[in-house]
Image (spheres, rainbow, N blue to C red):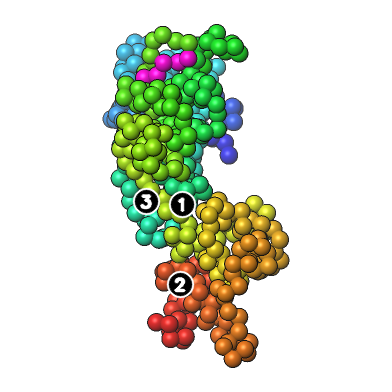
């Protein structure tokens, strides 16, 4: 669609000249002979840029600028003024006008100013869309969990997100520590700034120091230029130190100093450099035990552990497994560009009862494998052997007398399995079953489950 340009000019001849000039360039031109009329047009149209005279009868261009900015703070407004009124145009710039042009104007200069204004509008929109996408991607709807244990985690995240306090996230591998860290960042006022992450156990000490604190040119062999380091690169945003318990003792001392002084000393430098990054750390170790056994500095532990978030292992929140399974089935259906698949009660029961030492990461891998290997339904045979072998006594497919149950009985058992797995959360159960909540209520009533 052609961008809309709104012309606000009370002289009919000038409006006509501007309209012709802009329409030749391919713009869709909207015009108003007064600021009051312009506000009405602006309110019902998607205006890419507004081109307004500064002196008009009634409401002038400065007041129009204020009114437009009150509706859309990012709306580009270009002021047109005579040479004698440049001071007024500069005052408009201070109030948020995008730019100004003087009359009589050079056609190409005016057109270039309009082009620049439209591009600025597009960039603002792209930024809005990015922020919306980030907020959606890292909202709690993407962190699956209705269990009481996980809801407590959500409450802590909500409280600490917009503070500057350091956060220590503890949990086994695969429990989602980085996902929680990202949620904290993207729910804070730092969301528009960088979120940078590093695994402190993945690099040797000398490389880790350089990555964190930066280095100066010539500080060591291969240092062909200055490097800022993650602490400074994350300024204004968040630095996530994953597996901080693996950090070598000499670097623990330097990390402590950085956190205390809010400054780092790059490798090869003699003077410290300030940074402004929020620090979130994570570990799969018990740092209190590490402190007691002199493997982790006590003063650093307390500096990092201003706010502690403990993530429960998946086996401690089995009621979340069906919701996670449905989430991953939907995810891989989209990735494979196919329809979602139903998981049999036997397969779901096996997943609920498995120990999940690898936590959510292991569950996702199992669901992805099952999705790829399955037909129209995901059956227990599609699960990894170790999950199938532990499920033999978790799902009985025959009545005690050895007879196969009726279809109605199988449905009752399946519904009961899902209700148990979701902790009797009917909304979650209905979503997993693929039926309306009202339908679930009717079935539960028919089977004397409520």
Q: Is residue 373 left or right of residue 110?
A: right
Name, please, the residue furthest toward the front: 293
Most prominent secondary structure in the magenta stretch?
loop
Q: Which residues are magenta?
A: 262-267
Residue at the (31%, 24%) spot, across then down: 260
Q: Quadrant of residue 238?
A: top left
Q: Which residue is mark 1?
A: 143
Q: Secondary structure at mark 2?
A: helix
Q: Position of residue 241 (x, y in %)?
A: 45, 34
Q: Secondary structure at mark 1?
A: loop
Q: Position of residue 106 (x, y in %)?
A: 51, 14
Quarter containing the C terminus = bottom left
Q: Earlier in the sequence, mark 3 or mark 1?
A: 1
Picture disc at residue 153: 3
From this view, report whether residue 108 is shown above or below residue 305: above
Q: Position of residue 316 (x, y in %)?
A: 44, 59
Q: Earlier in the sequence, mark 1 or mark 2?
A: 1
Residue at the (41%, 34%) spot, across then down: 295
Residue at the (45%, 15%) spot, across then down: 266
Residue in front for this viewpoint, 393 or 89: 393
Residue in front for this viewpoint, 411 or 50: 411
Q: Position of residue 7 (x, y in %)?
A: 44, 30
Q: Which residue is mark 2?
A: 420
CA gap between label 3 and label 2 equals 22 Å
Residue in front for this viewpoint, 120 or 425: 425
Q: Is residue 265 magenta?
A: yes
Q: Earlier in the sequence, mark 3 or mark 2?
A: 3
Q: Is residue 191 magenta?
A: no
Q: Secondary structure at mark 3?
A: helix
For marks 1 and 2, give the one nearer the viewer.
2
CA gap between label 1 and label 2 equals 21 Å
């Amino acid at each position: 669609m052609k961008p809309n340009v709104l012309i606000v000019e009370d002289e009919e001849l000038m409006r006509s000249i501007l309209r012709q000039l802009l329409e030749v360039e391919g713009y869709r031109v909207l015009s108003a002979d007064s600021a009051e009329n312009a506000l009405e047009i602006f309110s019902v149209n998607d205006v890419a840029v507004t081109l307004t005279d500064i002196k008009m009868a009634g409401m002038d261009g400065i007041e129009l600028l204020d009114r437009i900015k009150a509706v859309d703070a990012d709306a580009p407004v270009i002021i047109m003024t005579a040479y004698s009124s440049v001071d007024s145009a500069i005052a408009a710039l201070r109030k948020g006008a995008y730019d100004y042009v003087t009359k009589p104007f050079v056609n190409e200069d005016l057109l270039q100013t309009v082009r620049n204004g439209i591009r600025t509008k597009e960039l603002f929109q792209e930024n809005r869309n990015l922020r919306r996408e980030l907020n959606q991607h890292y909202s709690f709807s993407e962190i699956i969990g209705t269990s009481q244990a996980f809801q407590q985690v959500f409450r802590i995240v909500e409280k600490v997100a917009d503070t500057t306090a350091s956060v220590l996230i503890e949990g086994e591998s695969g429990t989602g520590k980085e996902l929680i860290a990202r949620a904290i960042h993207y729910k804070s006022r730092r969301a528009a700034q960088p979120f940078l992450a590093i695994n402190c156990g993945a690099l040797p000490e000398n490389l880790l120091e350089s990555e964190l604190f930066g280095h100066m040119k010539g500080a060591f062999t291969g240092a062909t230029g200055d490097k800022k380091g993650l602490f400074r690169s994350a300024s204004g945003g968040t630095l996530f130190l994953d597996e901080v318990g693996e950090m070598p003792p000499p670097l623990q001392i330097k990390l402590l100093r950085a956190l205390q002084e809010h400054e780092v000393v790059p490798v090869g430098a003699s003077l410290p450099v300030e940074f402004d990054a929020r620090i979130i750390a994570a570990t799969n170790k018990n740092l209190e035990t590490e402190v007691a056994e002199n493997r982790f500095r006590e003063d650093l532990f307390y500096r990092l552990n201003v706010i502690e978030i403990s993530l429960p292992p998946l086996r401690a929140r089995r009621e979340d497994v069906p919701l996670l399974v449905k989430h991953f089935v939907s995810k891989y259906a989209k990735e494979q560009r196919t329809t979602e698949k139903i998981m049999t009660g036997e397969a779901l029961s096996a997943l609920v009862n498995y120990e999940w030492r690898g936590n959510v990461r292991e569950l996702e891998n199992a669901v992805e494998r099952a999705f790829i290997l399955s037909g129209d339904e995901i059956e227990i045979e599609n699960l990894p052997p170790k999950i199938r072998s532990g499920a033999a006594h978790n799902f009985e497919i025959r009545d005690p007398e050895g007879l196969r149950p009726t279809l109605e009985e199988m449905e009752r058992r399946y519904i009961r399995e899902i209700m148990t797995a979701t902790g009797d959360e009917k909304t979650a159960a209905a979503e997993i079953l693929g039926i309306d909540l009202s339908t679930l209520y009717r079935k539960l009533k028919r089977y004397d489950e409520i």
